[in-house]
Image: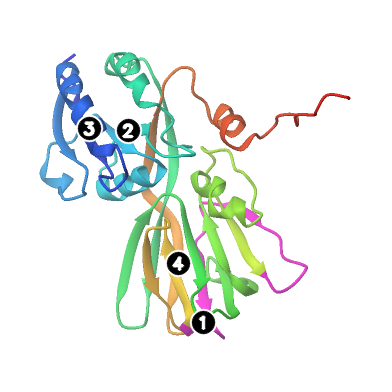
Amino acid sequence: MMGVKLYVLGNAQRAGVTAEAERLVPFLRSQCEVLTCDLCQQCDLDTLPLADLALVLGGDGAILRAARQMAYRQVPVLGVNLGRLGFLADLHPDEVRTCFPQVVRGEYRLTRHLMYECVVNDGDQTQTFLGLNEVVFHTVPPFGIVDLELALDGDPVARFSGDGLIISTPIGSTGHSLSAGGPILGQELQAFVVTPICPHALTYRPVVESAERTFTVTLGRGADHATLIIDGQLTVPLSARHRVSVRRAPVMFSLVKVPGHSFYQTLRDKLHWGTLPTYSSEP
């Protein structure tokens, strides 16, 4: 049992995370080998032995940070939710002591999810970002319309004019894309969804496309008042010189699912999807 190696990661800036880590880590050390407890993303995980699991404290945002911190050495994540929605971090802290011994024994299901690489080129230099949720092109103050052109595998396919554009993975489809009118994708699909943000037309609808394609966006009018947002956490100022490509990453994100927790249960519990409205009784 002690052969299991564990990273404990999280977001120390969220209330309660540090206290929860102090409460849980002694228990975790009794169950497995804890290689690091890093709640501030200060540890270079490449310098450590590869873990079998990563327990992430916080919320979905903490898991997005952890996925980028693990970079191209992804290990399965068990999320402990100290936030609100918790689509990825679906374990309550009180459940950890009950569920973790099962996890150490291998009594869990593992789901695998699409990650993306976002390649940003301004004509002089290229930056590559690894992400899990979505890439958002959006205007910044003073707000105005931005024109964007989308190409698939180098072929122009659409022009968008409005507040921006979202290219989302299935994991990210329940986030910003959903709020902008995009569809909910099954989380293990190998696809991206393209969702316009407040398009200045009546003809645009979200589109789901294969993850085997490369999505390239260039900017026109309004480009100097636009920014690129990676997983809602990293920002890159944009200009008309920029060319941004989104493609499947060479690694997958893995999520530990314990019995009693499922994606559709989370949709029902968090977003009330597929549930009947509550009617007041007749007077």
Q: What residue is disc 4 on?
A: 245
Task: Inspect the image, locate mark 1, and give the three-letter code of the amino acid beneath it.
Answer: Pro
Q: Is residue 192 left or right of residue 28?
A: right
Disc 4/disc 2 C-alpha distance (Å): 27 Å
At 62% from the left and 57% from the top, the residue drawn is 180
Q: Earlier in the sequence, mark 4 or mark 3?
A: 3
Q: What residue is disc 3 on?
A: 21
Disc 4/disc 3 C-alpha distance (Å): 38 Å
Task: Inspect the image, locate mark 4, and give the three-letter code of the amino acid beneath it.
Answer: Ser
Q: Earlier in the sequence, mark 3 or mark 1?
A: 3
Task: Inspect the image, locate mark 3, and give the three-letter code of the amino acid beneath it.
Answer: Ala
Depth check: give the residue in front, 57 or 84. 84
Q: What residue is disc 2 on?
A: 76
Q: How far across and down, in percent of the image, does residue 266 sit?
A: 54, 31
- Dot label at residue 142: 1
Q: Earlier in the sequence, mark 4 or mark 2?
A: 2
At 42% from the left and 20% from the top, the residue drawn is 258
